[in-house]
Image (tube, helix red, strand yellow):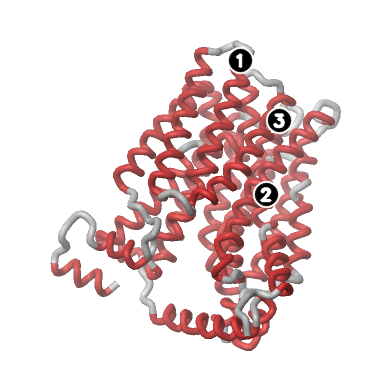
């Protein structure tokens, strides 16, 4: 019997991918919508936000996402991928309603935090679910669909913000509430859709439900291949059960400490470029440069479009170019763009040229960020951690990534108010130089190397281990 995926199985896999990646779409929409909603929300006759409360409203979602990312994986291991994504859809829906009807900044911050829990958990659960449902030959394509849905969600947020802002923004009170309310629609689609999506066969097998796992595998594979894959899953689970996983105590071992440090560095580097200052505050950046609110909302659509297009390019480049040079090129491009925004803000201050120059540089910035830095970040994080270190390494790294995102989101409006556009972007440019230095001095090339080769590289890097440390490493 052929091992090729049949038409029915392909249809089922496509349905699973489209429905589950609505979690990524919600991730994108809920992080992008604040970009256009904030200028209306901040008005005195609305929530009357200061730069500090603007920072809290924006970044409370990111702090929640840090916690959601840490605990999301554990919850899905315990209760199941499908069940937890169903619960996430419910949280997305209720938290979006809470934000829509928030009477003051305090309530808004609370519901944005709850929304963040769902965003962070979705960032972990949806890719894991897709990876477990996908056949090996299409796994990369299925998992990267989630990345595309995230940037597509942000683009949709920018488009709806522009439509609502330019049509009813001046006449209708609380236009920002309509912007936030739209997020309930994909949450409803995700919830109803997940009702007809099967559970992960790998999770079912891990709970001893072998018959049910085989039944679902037969829906998304040929019968012969389903039986072979089930045996592989059982063998893999048996190996994992015997594996002694690393804990925080193992950070005393130099090679483990170094690899975790590099993982944290990769996550932090992705965020200190300031990408989310543009994704969250793009409208205000364009307003400060000289655009009207309506023009800024429309200009933001260009940022969303380039993010989607660059993600396609980035996915294509991953198969052609080394991770390290791709990341270095991306960081050089983003740092140059940030520097030019700062320079243009001084040189063209008060000129009608400035808003267009700033928009051109934010578009260029996002081309480098989404086309090089972001794809490499998630791929390298999936490659550098050996199996026994993956739980600890990914947990710590993703938490630090979201916390850095939180700090950028919180301090950006405060900096913008205190020191202005040019100095704020010069600060991010300096951080960009630090990121380039880290990548040049610390990052290994992972393309074309097995997990075992990478582990050997980290074990033997830079110094001779003493006999005691070698024995300690062998025990881990």
At a point 60% along the width and 38% down the height, the residue shown is 279
Disc 2 crowd, CA 10 A, few/some/many (<14, 14-19, 20+): many
If the image is split into quadrants, where does the C terminus sit? bottom left
Q: Which residue is mark 2?
A: 111
Instruction: Work out whether residue 454 or residue 1 is closer to the camera in this orientation and state it.
Output: 1
Residue 137: image x %, image y %?
A: 55, 68
At a point 40% along the width and 69% down the height, the residue shown is 387
At a point 41% along the width and 63% down the height, the residue shown is 392
Asked if disc 3 and disc 2 are in contact, CB closer than 8 Å, the reply is no
Q: Is residue 317 above or below residue 75?
A: above
**What is the C-alpha distance between the residues marked 3 and 2?**
24 Å
Per the image, label 1 sits on a secondary structure element best described as loop
Q: Which mark is residue 162?
A: none
Instruction: Work out whether residue 1 or residue 227 is closer to the camera in this orientation and state it.
Output: 1
Instruction: Work out whether residue 365 or residue 275 is closer to the camera in this orientation and state it.
Output: 365
Residue 260: image x %, image y %?
A: 36, 57
Q: Which residue is mark 3?
A: 297
Mark 3 vs 2, N-terminal side:
2
**What is the C-alpha distance between the residues marked 1 and 3?**
18 Å
Q: Which residue is mark 1?
A: 353
At a point 64% along the width and 79% down the height, the residue shown is 217
Q: Is residue 377 visible?
A: no
Foreground mark, 3 or 2? 3
């Amino acid at each position: 019997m052929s091992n090729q995926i049949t038409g029915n199985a392909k249809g089922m896999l496509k349905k699973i991918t489209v429905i589950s990646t609505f979690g990524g779409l919600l991730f994108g929409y809920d992080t992008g919508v604040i970009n256009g909603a904030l200028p209306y929300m901040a008005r005195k006759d609305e929530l009357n936000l200061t730069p500090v409360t603007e920072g809290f409203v924006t970044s409370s979602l990111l702090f929640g996402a840090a916690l959601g990312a840490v605990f999301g994986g554990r919850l899905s291991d315990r209760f199941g991928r499908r069940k937890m994504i169903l619960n996430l859809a419910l949280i997305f829906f209720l938290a979006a309603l809470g934000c829509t009807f928030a009477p003051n900044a305090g309530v808004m911050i609370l519901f944005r935090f709850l929304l963040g829990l769902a965003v962070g958990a979705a960032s972990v659960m949806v890719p894991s679910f897709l990876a477990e449902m996908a056949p090996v030959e299409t796994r990369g394509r299925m998992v990267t669909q989630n990345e595309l849905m995230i940037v597509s969600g942000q683009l949709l947020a920018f488009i709806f913000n522009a439509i609502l802002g330019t049509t009813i923004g001046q006449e209708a009170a609380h236009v920002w509430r309509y912007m936030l309310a739209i997020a309930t629609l994909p949450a409803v689609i995700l919830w109803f859709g997940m009702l007809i999506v099967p559970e992960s066969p790998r999770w079912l097998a891990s709970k001893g439900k072998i018959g049910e796992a085989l039944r679902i595998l037969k829906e998304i594979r040929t019968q012969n291949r389903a039986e072979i894959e089930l045996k592989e899953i059982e063998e893999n689970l048996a190996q994992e059960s015997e594996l002694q996983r690393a804990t925080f105590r193992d950070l005393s071992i130099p090679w483990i400490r170094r690899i975790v440090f590099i993982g944290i560095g990769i996550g932090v580097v992705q965020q200190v470029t300031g990408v989310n200052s543009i994704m969250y505050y793009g409208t205000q950046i364009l307003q400060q440069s000289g655009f009207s609110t309506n023009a800024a909302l429309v200009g933001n659509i260009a940022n969303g479009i380039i993010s989607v297009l660059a993600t396609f390019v980035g996915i294509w480049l991953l198969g052609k170019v080394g991770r390290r040079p791709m990341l270095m090129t991306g960081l050089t491009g983003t740092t140059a763009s940030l520097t030019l925004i700062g320079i243009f803000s001084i040189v063209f201050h008060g000129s009608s040229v400035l808003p267009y120059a700033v928009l051109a540089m934010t578009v260029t910035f996002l081309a480098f960020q989404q086309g090089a830095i972001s794809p490499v970040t998630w791929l390298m994080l999936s490659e550098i951690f050996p199996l026994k270190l993956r739980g600890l390494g990914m947990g710590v790294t993703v938490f630090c990534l979201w916390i850095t995102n939180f700090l950028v989101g919180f301090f950006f409006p405060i900096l913008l108010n205190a020191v202005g556009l040019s100095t704020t972007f010069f600060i991010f440019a300096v951080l960009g130089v630090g990121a380039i230095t880290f990548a040049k001095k610390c990052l290994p090339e992972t393309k074309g190397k097995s997990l075992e080769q990478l582990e050997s590289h980290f074990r033997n890097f830079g110094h001779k281990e003493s006999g005691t440390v070698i024995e300690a490493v062998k025990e881990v």
